[in-house]
Amino acid sequence: METRAIRGFNDILPDQVKRWQHIEERARTIFEIHGYSEIRTPVVEFTDIFARSIGTTTDIVEKEMYTFTDRDGSSITLRPEGTAGVVRSFIEHNMYAKSPISKLYYMGMMFRHERPQKGRYRGFYQIGAELFGPKEPLADAEIIIMLWRYFEAIGISPFLRPEISSLGDENCRPLFKRELVKFFKPKRNELCEDCQKRLEQNPLRIFDCKKERCKEIAEKAPSILDNLCDECKEHFDLVKESLEKIGTPFVLNPRIVRGLDYYTRTVFEVTTEELGAQNAVGAGGRYDALVEELGGPPTPAVGFALGMERMLLLHEKMFPDGFKKEADAFIAHIGSEARNRAFLLAYELRKNGAFIDLDYEDKSLKSQLKRADKLGVKYTIIIGEEELRRGVLKVRDMRKSLEEEMSLEDVKKLAIKLKI
RNA sequence: GUGGGUGUAGCUCAGCUUGGUUAGAGCACUGGGUUGUGGCCCCAGAGGUCGCCGGUUCAAGUCCGGUCACCCACCCCA
């Protein structure tokens, strides 16, 4: 048996974790000032929850889910995305009865059995937000504005292209689909094999095809944005207007097709050129029918999900220098008596909130200073036998190579010096 | 699920074309040069199932077959 992680699942090692924490911490602060609260839902749900929300004919449900039979015979699935579980929780805890509006965000691991490649893993992390209750376009706008604000806050917005569109509602979308079929039918034989299938099942997806010929044909196809019903058009116009007022950038892309079936009206996608084929960093939209479909009361909603690993790749590009918390000081000691005293001092300083490290064994002063240097500390405290006798310690400024003696007992004064 | 590329030290890689002593380099690590002072430099040391299995051969890191893993792309998506 080889000792290794399961294919497509990665360890996030200490060197990387600081960056992860930074991205997560920024999400928390930005989302919370917009009124969102974190929710943590289980990583497994009954399979049915995902099948009903994501759509039974999507690739995710058809061939990418980690589905198991539980001991009682029920079918359970590792969550392939976050919205379904949040919606389930929203319904189960009657959140709609407690408040007309619920604003929730989540972060955590998702699971899809896909072939791994750059920016795509079987176990991956998403950060997402969901806004339940308001049907007004201001809600769509706010969530997109918050999303963009977040990208700016973590510094990756220069890499990103925000695109928005509308998919219409139950009135105009079916009509548009019929229009599309009417347009593509005569050119059926020129389309690739996949697109011929899409023409039957979900003609909107032809817009997703990467084949040159299909793209060429699709270019002349009618645009959903010209075929919205009056209500949807007004809604979309108001979303755009609000974004413009705030100054949140966006470009119209009437060819956005989401991979999940539940979206209605506003949809958006944030893409990048920097990541190769997996170019979607975040995406979302409105899903006014999902809560009701999963057994809740009719509740309009809008939300998004972001790919952590993809944001991280961009963040590394933007800020290549590692994110490392540097120790405030290192304590070097000479002799076993000094070592015990150093251990005690470390404890006292840490009680004062300082980040202190030291060696546990008796090593040469040279090697201890070497380690202090590697840690990048500003100060090294030296306690030798001689210092111990005189009740002092040396504080060495590693940058300036200057040393200063201080009392071994006056920890407060020492702490103040270290935290300059 | 399909195609291509790559697997040699902790990391980045050379060696493979043309098989031949104890498989190398740089970085990192440990010790020393300084009996108590880091970085730069010098010296020494430690560290390897050459992904795995099989075949060819007197002899395989090197050639052949298979297999697994990783990466990239298709597909799909965050």
Image (spheres, coloured by chain):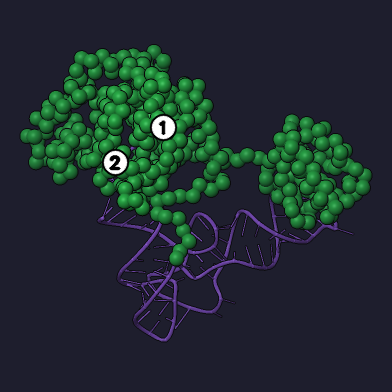
Chain colours: A green, B purple
Q: Is residue A23 left or right of residue A233?
A: right
State the separation of the CA atoms marked 2 and 1: 21 Å
Farthest residue in the front direction? A72
Q: Are marks 2 and 1 on the same chain?
A: yes
Determine crowd level at label 1: few under 14, some 14-19, many 20+ residues with C-alpha closer than 10 A. many
User: Is A294 located above or below residue A114 in the figure?
Assistant: above
Farthest residue in the left direction? A186
Q: In the rendering, at what x and y percent does residue A325 appear? A: 63, 39
Amino acid type indicated by mark 1 = Gly
Q: Is residue A403 left or right of residue A82?
A: right
Q: In the rendering, at what x and y percent does residue A366 appear? A: 77, 53
Which of these two is toward me, A232 or A154? Answer: A232
- Locate the N terminus of chain A by quadrant: bottom left
Q: Residue at x 81, y 33 (%)?
A: A412
Q: Earlier in the sequence, mark 2 or mark 1?
A: 2
In the rendered image, which residue does mark 2 sit on? A48
**Label number found at residue A19:** none
Amino acid type indicated by mark 2 = Asp
User: Is B66 located above or below residue A220 in the figure?
Assistant: below
Determine crowd level at label 2: few under 14, some 14-19, many 20+ residues with C-alpha closer than 10 A. some
Q: Secondary structure at mark 1?
A: strand
State which chain disc 1 sits on: A
Q: In the rendering, at what x and y percent does residue A278 appear? A: 35, 41
- Locate the C terminus of chain A by quadrant: top right
**Label number found at residue A128:** 1
Q: Quadrant of residue A213?
A: top left
The mark tally for this picture is: 2
